[in-house]
């Protein structure tokens, strides 16, 4: 019996998400992308411990 109120709230939220376009903060997006690009420069060193030579052999066999 309590489903009506829950469904009404869900419908309200869905309608708001569908018809109201939130304002995009392009400066924040640019800052985030720049920080990721700066962080990704050294990322190959971070993952080097997970590289296994067996993976290279398997790739060569498939060719």
Image: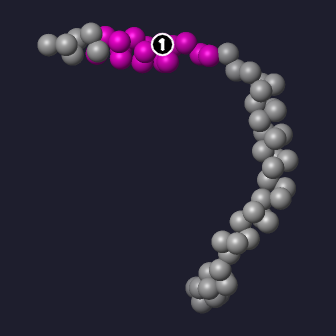
Q: Quadrant of residue 28?
A: top right
Is residue 18 left or right of 38 when viewed as pictured?
left
Residue drawn where x is 66% and y is 71% of the image:
50
Looking at the picture, does residue 35 appear above or below residue 8?
A: below
**Residue plotted at (49% across, 18% down):** 17
Question: Is residue 63 at least partly visible in the picture?
Answer: no
Q: Residue at the spot x=81%, y=49% of the render?
A: 39
The image shows residue 33, relative to residue 61, as above or below, that is above
Q: What sort of colour scheme is used for the picture?
A: one colour
Residue denoted by label 1 = 16
In the rendered view of the protein, which quadrant contains the C terminus? bottom right
Looking at the rendered image, the quarter that the N terminus falls into is: top left
Q: How many marks?
A: 1
Depth order, front residue of 2/10: 2
Q: Quadrant of residue 21?
A: top right
Q: Main secondary structure of the magenta part?
A: helix
* Residue 42 appears in the figure: yes
Which percent across, then down, holds residue 60? 65, 87
Q: Residue drawn at (62%, 85%), measured in percent from left and top?
A: 54
Q: Which of 47/7 is in front?
A: 47
- Horizontal relation, residue 45 to residue 58: left or right: right
Q: Is residue 18 magenta?
A: yes
Which x, y percent locates residue 6? Answer: 29, 15
What residue range appears in magenta? 7-22
Task: Determine the secondary structure under disc 1.
Answer: helix
- Residue 10 location (% of width, % of height): 36, 17
Mark 1: few/some/many CA within 10 Å (<14, 14-19, 20+): few
Q: Is residue 25 above or below residue 52?
A: above
In the visual, does 22 lie left or right of 26?
left
């Amino acid at each position: 019996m309590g489903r009506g109120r829950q469904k009404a709230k869900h419908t309200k939220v869905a309608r708001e998400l569908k018809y109201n376009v939130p304002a995009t903060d392009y400066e924040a997006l640019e800052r985030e992308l720049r920080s990721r690009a700066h962080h990704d420069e050294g990322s190959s060193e971070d993952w080097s411990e997970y590289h296994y030579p067996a993976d290279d052999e398997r790739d060569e066999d498939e060719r």
